[in-house]
Image (tube, grey):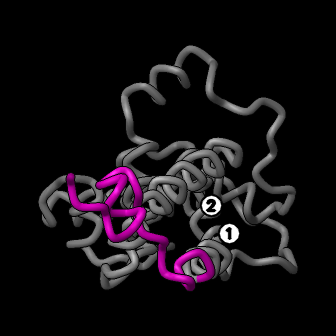
Amino acid sequence: MAAQPESATEYLGAAVATAPEPNLRAEFGANLEANYPRLVAQLCMITLSPGEAQDLVQEAFARAWQRWGDIRELPDPTHWVRQMAVRGSNSRWRRLLSKLGRGKHTGEVPSDDPQHAAVLDALRQIPPYRRRALVLGDVAQLSLEEIADIEGIAPGVAEARLTHARRELNEFMAMQGPVPASPSHWEDM
């Protein structure tokens, strides 16, 4: 007669996973709550679409939740989430859908604030790969090495993209002329 298993886990083998740490869900929720709005704002400046930005950040957080036990051990778990969202914005599939007029949320107005609208209009004139470098460097305040890591490029290329994007943004903003003052700011980006 075979020996009886000592526990249900031993009986069912690898099919039964151990319960996650009690604070895992709370820890993930706190990270999500603290970082979601800021990441959506950053991705909105990259994609120029609030709906697409929300989709990308939600997808990135969903991927993070699946591996939260490992991701939470990283020096900056939010960097991983941002990296996944930004890489998602650069996927060939999303660009193709965008060109076909799908995947964009119609009727969206990213901001009714004249200053925000002016910045978004200027950002719209900058090629996406430079716009990503600008937002990651100046809004998310990432280092050139972090930008290079996210984009899969050399730090020197990241620096060149950031320099060009800053110059282009300044040129486009100057062409727009003065923008009325507004009480709201994008301080939390």
Badge 1 amino acid: Pro
User: In this picture, is 143 found above or below 52?
Assistant: below
Label 2 crowd bin: few (<14), some (14–19), many (20+), radius 10 Å? many
Q: Is residue 130 visible?
A: no
Q: Position of residue 33 (x, y in %)?
A: 67, 76
Q: Position of residue 3 (x, y in %)?
A: 23, 61
Closer to the camera, 4 or 188?
A: 4
Please tell me which residue is depicted at 66% across the width and 43% down the height of the picture.
49
Q: Position of residue 128 (x, y in %)?
A: 43, 43
Please tell me which residue is depicted at 48% across the width and 30% down the height of the picture.
94
Q: Position of residue 53 (x, y in %)?
A: 61, 49
Q: Which residue matches tag 1?
A: 37
Closer to the camera, 51 or 155?
A: 51
Q: Name the mark on residue 40.
A: 2
User: In this picture, is 12 found above or below 5?
Assistant: above
Instruction: Judge left or right: residue 114 versus residue 64.
Output: right
